[in-house]
Amino acid sequence: MPRRLQLEHLDHSGSRIQREVTSLTHMRNKSFAS
């Protein structure tokens, strides 16, 4: 795998994980608020 593609793949995976963590935190905050 070319190095540039490898870096893009890692970056894409990282941003996807970040979104999942953010949505999980958001849901948890909503359940605490109610």
Image (cartoon, grey):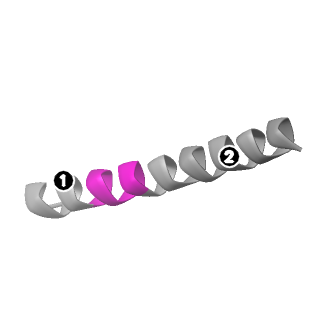
Please report the residue visible at 38 percent of the width from the left and 48 percent of the height from the top. 14
Mark 2–mark 1 CB contact (< 8 Å)? no
Q: Circle 2 sits in a helix, a strand or a loop, which is it?
A: helix
Residue 3 image point, x, y percent: 10, 54
- Left or right placement of residue 33 versus residue 16 in this view: right
Q: Nearer the viewer, mark 2 or mark 1?
A: 2
Please report the residue visible at 34 percent of the width from the left and 60 percent of the height from the top. 12
Task: Specify the amino acid type for callout 1.
Answer: Leu
Q: Nearer the viewer, residue 8 or 20?
A: 20
C-alpha separation, residue under disc 2 versus residue under disc 1: 26 Å
Residue 30 image point, x, y percent: 77, 47
Residue identified by numbered label 1: 7
Chain-order first, disc 2 or disc 1:
1
Task: Specify the amino acid type for callout 2.
Answer: Leu
- Occupied quadrant, residue 29: top right
Residue 6 image point, x, y percent: 21, 55
Near mark 2 (Cα within 10 A), the count class, few <14, some 14-19 or many ≥20, is few
Determine if the magenta segment contains residue 11.
Answer: yes
**Label of residue 24 in the image:** 2
Residue 8 image point, x, y percent: 22, 61
Please report the residue visible at 46 percent of the width from the left and 57 percent of the height from the top. 16
The image quadrant where one finds the N terminus is: bottom left
Near mark 1 (Cα within 10 A), the count class, few <14, some 14-19 or many ≥20, is few
The image quadrant where one finds the C terminus is: top right
Residue furthest to the top in view is 32
Determine if the magenta segment contains residue 4.
Answer: no
Please report the residue visible at 66 percent of the width from the left and 48 percent of the height from the top. 26
Q: Main secondary structure of the magenta part?
A: helix
Q: Circle 1 sits in a helix, a strand or a loop, which is it?
A: helix
Magenta-tinted stretch = 9-15
